[in-house]
Image (cartoon, helix red, strand yellow):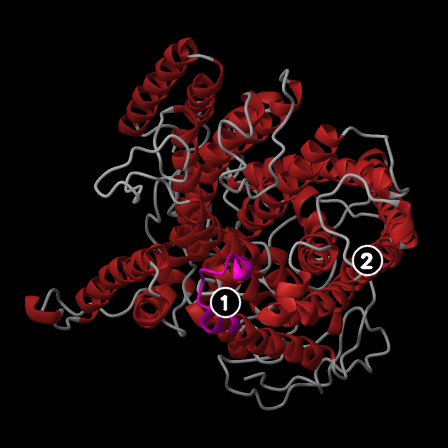
Amino acid sequence: MTDLVRPALAGVDLHAPEHEEHHGPTGLLKWFTSTDHKVIGMSYTITSVVMFYLAGIMALLIRTQLASPNSSLLSFSQFNALFTMHGSLMLYLFAGPFAFGGLANFIVPIQVGAPDMAFPRLNALSYWLYLTGSITMLLGFFTSSGAAEFGWVAYAPLSNAANSPGAGPDLWIVSLLLTGFSAIFTGVNLVGTIFYLRAPGMTMFRMPVFTWNMLVTGILILIAFPVLTAAVVMLFADRHFGTHIYETTGCHMVGHPNVPAACGVPVLYQHLFWFFGHPEVYILALPYFGIVTEIIPVFSRKPLFGYKGMVFATMAIAALSTGVWAHHMFTTGVVLLPFFSLLSLLIAVPTGIKFFNWIGTMWRGQLSLKTPMLFSLGFLFAFLMGGVTGVMLASPPIDFFTHDTYFVVAHFHQVLFGTAVFAGFAGFYYWFPKMWGRMLNDGLGKWHFWLTFIGFWLTFMPQYGVGLKGMPRRVASYPADLGWQIYNQLSTIGAFIIGLGFLLLLINLLISWRNPVPAGDNPWDGHTLEWFTSSPPPHHNFTHLPPIRSERPTWDYNHPEAPALHHGVPVVGNGNGHHPRDPGGNGSSGKEEKVPT
Amino acid sequence: MRDESVFLIGVGVFFGIVGLIYWLTAYEDAGGVLLLGTCFLGLVPGLYYYYWYCRFHGRKFFFFGQVGKAVGPRPEDRPDATLAEGAGVVSAFPDSSIWPLVLGSGAFLLVLALVFGYWLAFPGIGLIITALVGVTAESRRGGHV
């Protein structure tokens, strides 16, 4: 087929034959100077997974401390620093960057048929700011006063100069400055790439759902991160430059002697933080929804059920998530409860649509329970449980009762573990062959999954119970006579089972490094463009492209007898459903192909 | 271009409405200002894309009148576009560049100066200026492409 060659690709550098055989720097210099989105994506992935392991070790220390009442393994100060850094590393340095810096950076340009990100040097700068920001945050452990101890939210006035003195909190603040800009630049890059660098025929409503979700995430980043960055700059100014934005001590009385007009407002920090913080939760969820939406159709041998429903549900979740920030502040008594409760409850509707569509995609499909699919299924269960308790917490009467207890801890860990860990590592196993050109061992991967899955439930379900019994979060010690011990012990055992699972991942990576099994271009019989190019992809991603006539261009090209879709129009005569990996030829991939919209 | 502009203008309209409801019911300033800002964050680029949509399609852009000749949608906006239609220079992509690392290191030292002492700002600003000059020169040369 002659029209496979995309001349536009040569348009990157039409007359330079050496273009395909790239002569850039190699070795270490490549990692320092490359502006290739694939190299940057891999750097992001490696760095964020390292952050994940560091934060995981902190979690295990926290759980060990809490396994027995009146424990003295850690000092209160060490415990505070550990939960602060565990949360900060997981949320700022792992879950977000792993999704939008690692996987999206690598995958989105390939999925839309682009040669690179729209702003490659900006992309590289994003990574360096992220890396230096990560180092800055970890430097806190090496200061004389230790790392920050005010939780990952750094509420004023706890985070002011009097209550949190020292260099550790300052390092925490400036590290968010660096990573904040890094995220903003990545958001700009994602939106620019998706709007301007799509291949011919790749209309907006043919983009893979992962790319759609990254577009919406990019907009959310642009909404949320500047607010955080501004909020922490003002926090720094309050701490060091004598401003009174959140600060209430040492105010000048202006005007009426009883009205401190020049005084700061601590709750303003909460407004600013959560105006970032709640969209951030969805910045940490939507990419992972996208990953699962890529994996489930491929491992069900069916097109996605309800493509447009998925896209609009993503938009609805993102839009609503920006109007719910003060549900974190119900107990402050200064927010409009009905407004925030209603919008929070509404988020369950588009999320429910997504669940319906995921199940609809699997319905009567030929499920292939490989590791990525298992992790995706694990995500469905985990996120559902976290989501249901989220609906409960959106109701102010329940929130007043459970606020700042382990019930909330269990809720958000189930949500974020569901997304960033289950769906995140589903994506890791799914795209690892594309990134590195080699497979991960599926058997070990399944062990990794089951240990993580069992450990997950064992860790977090007891936390609901102990939360309802009144155990507050962020306490380093508890008395023995309250009946909290058994819950905490179960939780600790679960955490170590998860730890064991992730040890298996390390072994798996080691095996893949020492005894590589070549992946081939398309090991999963994937649907989207990244499975059309080689593994790992060449410089500027493609030597040629298939015609893009549906959401599944690679599938259409590899299965001309069973093209799924023609932009929402059903194809008559789907063929016999023959499938290369289905030697009997009795697969249902042809028969089951219905128009999803 | 149409879908992109509708998407962004939709962001603006949604947050305009939510912001208005919030402003009228919550009596709280911070959230109102933030929602207004978010409304503009959608509207400003959304209208920019709508302007380009009007240019491509020879349509009137509000009171500016017709802003361009109708050249039709871009190949990536047409479901029937062939790959050959995407021919031509997509963009110039830098190959490899040391300057993002230098700029990032400069920013690193600059923020550390806020914590450990202002003397760190001097090498930091030095690196940033070097990187800005370097990246400008690289862009003007065309780099490696």
Q: Nearer the viewer, residue A586 or A401?
A: A401
Span colored in magenta: A329-341
| Residue A349 position in % (x across, y down) | 57, 78
Prevailing SS of the magenta stretch: helix
How far, Cα to Cα, is label 1 from label 2? Answer: 56 Å
> Quadrant of the image for the C terminus of chain A?
bottom right
Three-letter amino acid code of the residue under disc 2? Val
On residue A547, which mark appears? 1
Provide residue A230's location: percent of width, then percent of height.
38, 40
| Residue A229 appears in view | yes
Secondary structure beneath dot 2 equals helix
Q: Is residue A594 above or below residue A347?
A: below
Q: Amino acid at mark 1?
A: Pro
Left or right of A28? Residue A280 is left
What's the chain of the residue with tag 2? A
- Give the structural element (helix, strand or loop) at label 1: loop
Horizontal and vertical percent position of residue B134: 34, 20
Q: Nearer the viewer, residue A479 or A110?
A: A479
Residue A466 - label = 2
In the image, A431 versus B19, the foreground residue is: B19
Counting labels gives 2
Which residue shows up at 55% across the image and 66% down it? A209
A339 magenta-colored: yes
Say if labels 1 and 2 share a chain.
yes
Q: Is residue B116 left or right of residue A415?
A: left
Whether A323 is among the magenta residues is no
Figure check: A415 above or below A381: above
Q: Left or right of A301: which side holds B122?
A: left
